[in-house]
Amino acid sequence: MKMRDLNIRNGVVYDPLNRIDGERMDIYVRGGRIVETPVKDAEEINASHMVVMPGGVDIHSHIAGTKVNVGRLMRPEDHFKDVLPRTGIRRAGVGHSVPTTYVTGYRYVEMGYTTVFEPASPPLKTRHTHEELDETPIVDKGCFPLMGNNWFIMDYIRENKYEECRDYVAWLLEAVKGYAVKIVNPGGVEAWAWGKYITHLDEPVPRFEVTPREIIRWLCRINLELKNPHPIHVHTNNMAKPGNYETTIETMDSVKDMASNTDGKPIIHVTHVQFTGRSGTSWVNVGSGAPEIADYLNKNRHAEIDVGQIVFGDTTTMTADGSFQFLLHLLSGNKWANSDVEVETGAGVVPFRYRRGNYVNAVQWGIGLELALLVKDPWRVHMTTDHPNGGPFTEYPKVISWLMSKKSRKRLLGKINSTARRRLTLGDIDREYSLYEVAMVTRAAQARSLGLTWKGHLGPGADADIAIYNLNPKQVDPSKDYLKVRKAFKKAAYTIKDGVIVCKDGEIVETPLGRTYWVKPPLPEESLESLASNISGRFKEYYTVEMDNYVIDEGYLANPQAVAPAR
Amino acid sequence: MLIRGVVCTVCGCCCDDLNVEVVDGRVERVENACSLALSKFKHHSSDRILKPLMRKGNGFKEAPYHEAIREAARLLVDSNYPLLWGWCLTSCEAVKLGLELAELVGGVIDNNSSVCHGPGLIGVQDIGISGCSLGEVKNRADLILYWGSNPVNAHPRHMARYTAFAKGRFEASRGDRKLIVVDVRRTETAKLADEFYQIEPNSDYELLTALRCAVNGEEMELNTVAGLPVERVEELADSLISCRFGVLFYGLGLTMTYGKSRNLDAALSLVRDLNRKTKFLIMPMRGHFNVTGSNEVFTWVTGYPFGVDFSKGYPEYNPGITTISDVLRREECDAALIVASDPIAHLPSSLADTLKKIPMITVDPHRTPTTEASRIVIPSAIVGLESTGTVYRMDGVPLECKKILNPPPGVKTDFEVMSDLLAEVKGLLR
Amino acid sequence: MEYVLKYYKPTRLPLDLSPLSPEALEGKSAGEVAEMKVYAGKRMIELSRFFNVELRASGEDQHVKITIVGDLRNARRIGCEMKGGEMRVVGNGGIYLGERMKGGVITVEGDVDSWTGSGMRGGSITINGSAGDFLGASYRGSREGMSGGVIQVNGSIGCEGGAWMKGGLIHVKGSAGPFLGVHMQGGSILVEGNCPGRVGAGMIGGRIAVLGKMLNLLPSFTVDSVRTHADLGAVKVEGGFYMFTGDNNEQGQGRIYVSKDENPHFAWCEKYLGRWE
């Protein structure tokens, strides 16, 4: 039994959920949980002059499942440059933009992350997602089943059957052991199944006659009624349109009226907004729509976002938005994979290189940072790169340094396409994130948004998921010494998971298996049976598998943890 | 006892609607099974290996299980460049352990794709793939093209469950769909087609290229291609462009004929080009029930779908170098673990002869030419009948197999055998 | 100075000789080289187990040369990522010879296997015997084919020579297998012997000349003209040639020159000439 008792002494602690901002204090761990008083015979860690934060929480990262594996298959040339030999502790693998599952777990943990969510899993193939998550070591994890192009849901909307739709969503989350309601290009991926496109929220989906707006509103209402821990997680329509920020605002606005029913928590999460944050009418004149989106978010508290920041370099784009991926293939000429899934959704994968000299890429780089810097409330703007779409997650330290240091931004601004530089307002933004705010956008806010009340903070009762970084806030000015910031966040001095030291000085030392969280909305037994018999006829007609084989038993997962919604 | 929703473990269709009646530990009756499935369900108990065997002279002696495992582990650990082969007629759970074992013993681990649909995977690495799940075909396809594939014989329920004869939401019957076959001979499937294009053997690449020209509006300066008049080629291209939702299924007629992975390069490119005009997809007609699963597990653990060399401690991949035919041709391996496969029967005889010269450990339910040539044989349970396990259909849909019978007494599952072998190897390496 | 490595104990195991480059050996004594470890199968073994190592210094000569004597058909990566200096194999040269080479000279007296000069960037490789498949090709999935340097093969080569090539010159005195120049992007390929066909498949740029017989032409190529010489940029060959352009499916600007005398079966294309007039 590994040591799960620790006394972490004298660290400089940043714990926003408990309003601790750089206080020198001890953190005590007993039996894998944070406790209030020092623990007898515990292992001692001297964290003097080091930053102590909760373990990182990544709300949106494509790490497991069918489209990720298509990405791996397609990119042997990405793998051979970044190989990891086996050690006594670590399995072998390959890395860079589409790492293998073992390498994914190790590299997150090396950066002090302890929880990661795969944000787009087709229900029919979610068993595959779970197989991969079960081979992703150490981190706690979960996945979001895709629902925004689901035939049952669209049929219920058209037939105006709200209760059945609600029960179906609850059933689906439990059936595939998913964590949240994910919506990608609502209606648009169904159109793409015919090779067609949807371009605005009120355009009817071919042959279903429901609109994206209706899909979003219904699922938002259902999600609120089921009291699921995380809001609806939405990748908006129009990702391939040059100017698309208005769609982002319209999408957030489409559910605004439902906000009064809640406790002030956001009711919609719009994801990787950098990709849908552009202004302009063509690729020649795209600009940043970040100021407008930030303005909306600053005035409206019902919505939150994650950034999806791009990092210059070679990476692999992959989303459930098959139509966007095809268009990206046409634009770039790069190889292209497509993976439509019956009744439910689609996906696409295209390798891509973001270049500083490329006008559009440079604008994209600016948009992400402008969003992070112009939105005033760090609780509602999470830091991600939409790994690997904007860049590999191993680049998070770079993004953190850009948030904290105007100097680092200016330096890179000087190297990007000059027209883009002139179009962006980024150069005029002075704001620099503090360590407290970094702790918010890389862990506290994400944990809170996910409803993981026992994560993302260091208060008593929390899981002892802790990151200790070799960064002395008294000596290092992140604004000037941003390279030191990058170095510190790249290899944590300690990563602790459930009270066990799993990583020391950036080296993995233990590899426990983390938990897979899934949400179990309470559905009375009669509703479940009635639902099953209602859908079984259509299930057989539409799908090519038996309904009993579609459902994933909890016992199939290696380390499942059901989460009941708040009541 | 009638067990519903049994997943068939024969071909890549992985039909999961079989209802099996089991009486006194035997299969009495199977509903919804094709002839291949029926044969497996009825005859799985013939030629079974019942006890672990170790070579003695020209024959075998029965050996205690743990002795066989110990000896197998020692052989693999002591070898300088072992080969771990097979992995397609077993569960993903066993494949995962096989990969960990290969990492530990520093060998080349390869699966049946390298002699079957590997070229399609190589093509995907250069071009990508416009793919979908089989239900998309059932519900939407108004054009179905089988190229170098004969499902009537090799995937008997494919057309009824998923394609031409299936009933879908938007395309309800055979009459709504056009069935086209391209092949070198008039197969049973060709006889059912609305249009059959008989082509010269080994000319698929030329025909695919010509079709691309027609689809892309490029002029051709030829009268015939692949034995067809250019007008017939243009007619086929027209059918492909004017459908609403077309799907190209391909088999070994493309992967294992002159051109191999470049044939797939051309087919994948054709389908990609077609997507500028209409919706078009492509899918390989995988032969084994879990070769897709094997590729998936290999890929998420190593980054590569087959042919992985762990001799340097990290995965390396290059078909032609790290694949079974080539390591055997160069006589590089000095020990082999064969799991759920019969390479002695299926490889070219010169390679089979090479394989016979090195000590082989074979894990298999049945007596085969490979077990007969092995040094150590460990019996195993049949996945999908006598053991559970995850398998992947040809379109990447994962399914969990049921256990409906008990294996012969004392016979373990592949997963159990691999677990024990792994534990023994870890002990030796400590 | 010259290091001479005599392969006295051949092995069937794959032998990874990538650690042996002129840059890596420079300054080492023969004993130090003999102690260097290389992968033989899964184990790292001292070179001395397979090779006798001799160092023939020659005064002020700073140029480092490595001569390997023996049948190295199972070796991998001789001259991999070499930057300068010279390597010579008196015997067969194995797989991945000169992979991603940047400079220097490699000569092989015998044959080589596949992936010779894969992703080469500069320098020169001369093979006196024959080469296998994927000469100068890019790695799987990659478009980074050979971008510079010269590979000369006095014998024949296998299939897919020059796959995804971007620059440099491949000169084959013997024949080539099918799919010569597949997905070629630039550079020059000259084959003095025959090639069965599928030449230039998927080509978008670059120039190929076949002086012997080419059995077929892909439907995605169209005839451009009859030429008095083949202009490959790096090299010009005199003689009557049919010149084809393509691959039209890739909007290709590639050129294939085929000897008119050796390929009378292409005479049909003459009727398409002058069709724009």
Image (spheres, rainbow, N blue to C red):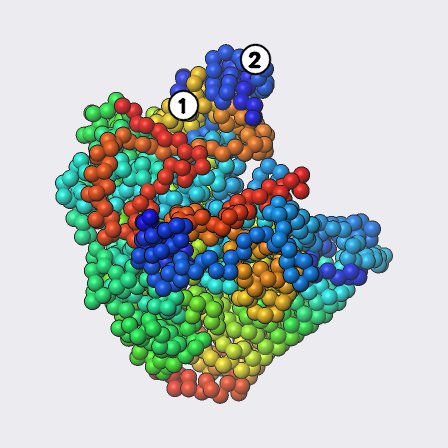
> Residue, x 30% and y 33% (percent of image)?
A269
* Residue B120 visible within the image: yes
Which residue in the protein does label 2 denote?
Answer: A40
Which residue in the protein does label 1 denote?
Answer: A454
> Residue, x 38% and y 60% (percent of image)?
B37
Q: Label 1 to label 2, Cα distance in Å? A: 23 Å
The chain that hosts pointer 1 is A
Residue that lies at the very extreme toward the right in this rendered image: C59
The chain that hosts pointer 2 is A
Q: Secondary structure at mark 1?
A: loop
Residue A372 x %, y %? 38, 32
Residue A508 x %, y %? 57, 34
Instruction: Please tell me which residue lies in front, B346 or C53.
Output: B346
Residue that lies at the very extreme toward the top in this rendered image: A37
Q: Quadrant of residue B132?
A: bottom left
* Amino acid type of the residue that numbered disc 2 sits on in the rendered structure: Lys
> Residue, x 23% and y 57% (percent of image)?
B168
